[in-house]
Amino acid sequence: MPLQQSPQKPVKSAVIVSKVYKRPVSGAIREIASILKELGVEVCLDANTSIGFNIPEIPSISRREMRDRDLIIVVGGDGSVLGAARTLVDLKVPMLGVNRGHLGLLTDVSPSDLRESLEKIVAGRYTIEQRTMLDVRVTRDNEDGAGELIGQSLATNETVIHSGMMAHMMVFRVSIDNRYMYTLRGDGIIVTTPTGSTAYSLSAGGSIIEPHLDVLALVPMFPQSLNCSPIIIPGKSNIKIEFECSDNVAELIAINCDGQVTMRADTKCTVSIHQHHVPLTFIHPEGYDYYSLLRQKLGWGQSLV
């Protein structure tokens, strides 16, 4: 999903969202609102954000009303963007991340260039980028053989399936588009989007994947076999993960999405993963460069000593 370059439609209305209830973020919200008002933009707060920060001077709107805004501005760190993405992606409103966290791979507007970035965006000088999201479903066969849905969540970065215990091996049977791929013995398996390839998947030995590529990756966690490598598959693939039970006794498993949502199940369940039907849309100020972001955030090219 390649970047759509500027010029784009000017921004006339925006809503600010944050889940980080700290005073510095409260100040950042007021600063963003002030700049946008100076630029002639109608500014509102998400109702939950308004309550959490107690900023009565900025009008608040409901989630349903956010659908009519030109832009959602998420203030915080990458975790704030991940949480907002899961709950707001179906509104189909572009999202901008303003960094008040640590790493900031998803919040590419820093405090030092806040005004300049907002001026560019309001004037239509920005690029649009769509990112893949995962739809994760957990089912259990009932008496008539039909799969009963017992859990469902979206994920922007990755889904991690594991036992919930440290150093506990499980047996995973993985199929792609109803074709058997392999049986994995290990502590867990990560299914990641290109966005998540710089997150938990990277620390487990997965490759960095350019965000515009329409692919997914499966990354084993501490596999028993040394030849069980990460694999990249087409983005439209339907992934099914089943489990082998020793002595037909079900063991507990955990299905974690973006490190924020955890679904509990057991090894008699099936986990199905596919692309969510609505992609996440990001806005980047004019001049955004993914490779520059990686050099800055991940320290590419820097001396190790």
Image (cartoon, rainbow, N blue to C red):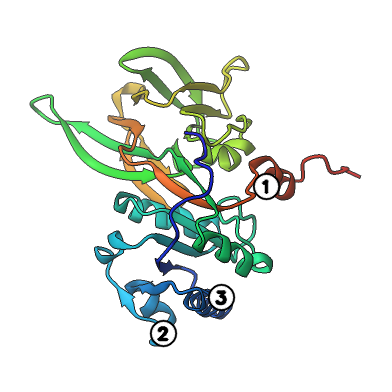
Q: Position of residue 210 (x, y in %)?
A: 58, 33
Q: Percent position (x, y) of residue 57?
A: 40, 87
Tell me the number on the disc at residue 28: 3
If you read the primary sequence from the N terminus, does the residue marked by circle 2 or circle 3 appear first? 3
The image shows residue 65 at horizontal and vertical percentages of 26, 66
Name the residue that disc number 1 marks.
Answer: 293
Query: Label 1 is placed on what type of residue?
Result: Leu
Q: Amino acid at mark 2?
A: Asn
Q: In the rendered image, which residue does mark 2 sit on?
A: 54
Question: Mark 1 vs mark 3: which is more N-terminal?
Answer: 3
Residue 73 sits above or below residue 36 on the image: above
Give the class, few, some or many, for how many residues have Cα within 10 Å of label 3's Cα (few <14, many ≥20). Answer: some
Seen at 52% across and 22% down, the residue is: 232
Residue closest to the far bottom = 57
Instruction: Tell me the distance, in whole angstroms, between the alpha carbons under discs 2 and 3.
Output: 14 Å
| x and y percentages locating residue 175 in the rendered image | 36, 18
Please tell me whether mark 3 sits on a helix, a strand or a loop.
helix
Task: State which tag comes first along the sequence, 1 or 2.
Answer: 2
